[in-house]
Image (spheres, rainbow, N blue to C red):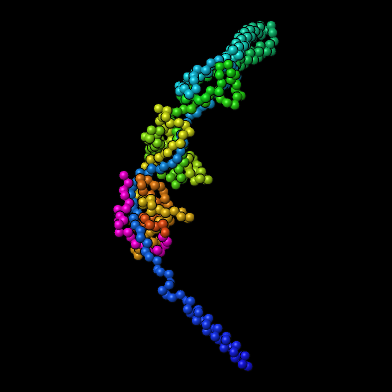
Amino acid sequence: MHIKKTTILFSTLVLVIGASLALALRPSPATAPARQKSVLVSLTTARQQDLPLELSAQGHLVALNQVEVRPQLTATILAIHFKEGDDVKAGQLLFTLDDADARAQLQRTEAQVAQIQAQLADAERDHHRSSELVQSHFIAPSAVDTAASKVDALRAQLKAARADVDSTRQLMLHTRILAPVAARTGAVAVHPGSLAQTSASAPLVTLVQFNPIGVEFNLPEQHLAALLRARAQGPVRVLIDGPDGRPVQGELTFINNVVNTDTGTISLKASLPNAAGTLWPGAYARVTVLAGSDKNAVVLPPQAVLEGPDGRFVFLAGPDNKVVRQPVTLLRVQDGLAVVAGVASGSRVVQEGGANLRTGDAIQVDANAPSPASAVRSAP
């Protein structure tokens, strides 16, 4: 009985000591996390203003006209009348081929024409005599029909023979290969004495037009409507950076008839003057398209637009100086301004200091920062 009382007293003592320890280890109000302070930021105001619509892209220069010169008959090359890299004019003689075979063929076809003409003249005389004899009842009428059929057959043969002569004369013209366009010549794949073959895989030479020259580039499909509106009002100007740093101005000439669904872009092409020949096909080019004006565009300083895993956004400052995250679409950066969609004009936006903000955070406006009214400068 005494042992049982001792056990109960010991258990009670353990419970009292445990409760005392728990009470002693409980954090006091003084050690609770401190309330977060306001974040120091600078603000700007989203503004609407008219901007020239300048669309930037990266492209490559291309030849607007490129011709592979190939022979139209198999013959030996007698002479080459230009040097690699020369500028040639349209109609200029490039190659002279051996015309011996073509000349012999022409003589054969002309001889065949003369032979058929003689046979036709004889057949016509026979037909005339037969017509006179049948009237005198010396021959049967069927003989006249036979003579007439012979005349018709020879006339058809004569027509075919004359066509052969024309074809052979055209073949003779192919022994002189002329430049179809004004262009610059590339590498020559043959030499005098080489056999020019119609079945050869490589052309005799490739001609590339340098003036004018083209530039190919792509733009996001969201700009298609603006491009079409600008083109409906007149020529759309296109600028690229020239080799000397000065811009070269051309004109938009082509808008593709489909949007690339894989990239969400539209293919375009422009034509540019290149009289000096300094723009080279295949070279990289920075392209600017002047597509009219963008009325009432909403602009912000570029640093106000942040980017996260879900896309671009800004922080809007409320009347209580607490911020709200607002998704936006960055249309382009132009003249030091970010043109955005998704923010109303007049909204107060965090310009600097928003990197570590979250929705609901309190902010404190930096007194030394420019006022929101002057934070967005006007475009030149």
User: Quick one: 41 or 176, which is closer to the camera?
Assistant: 41
Residue at 51% x, 43% y is: 260
Q: Which residue is drawn at 38% across and 57% down?
A: 353
Magenta residues, start to end: 357-380
Picture residue at 37% right of the left edge, 34% below the top: 246
Residue furthest to the bottom in view is: 1
Q: Position of residue 237 (x, y in %)?
A: 38, 37
Main secondary-structure element of the magenta-colored stretch: loop
| Image-based side of 154 in relation to 210, left or right | right
Of 122 and 376, nearer the camera is: 376
Residue 370 lies in the magenta stretch: yes
Residue at (42% x, 28% y) in the render: 277
Is 296 situated above or below 34? above
Asked whether the viewer can see residue 262, the reply is: yes
130 up-or-down from 13: above or below: above
Magenta segment includes 364: yes
Q: In which quarter of the image is residue 3?
A: bottom right
Above or below, 316 relative to 197: below
Observer-nearest of 13 and 86: 13
Estimate the x, y position of residue 121 in percent, counting from the top left: 61, 8
Kindly indicate the quadrant of the structure image that contains residue 11: bottom right
Looking at the rendering, in which quadrant would you find the C terminus? Answer: top left
Quarter occupied by residue 170: top right
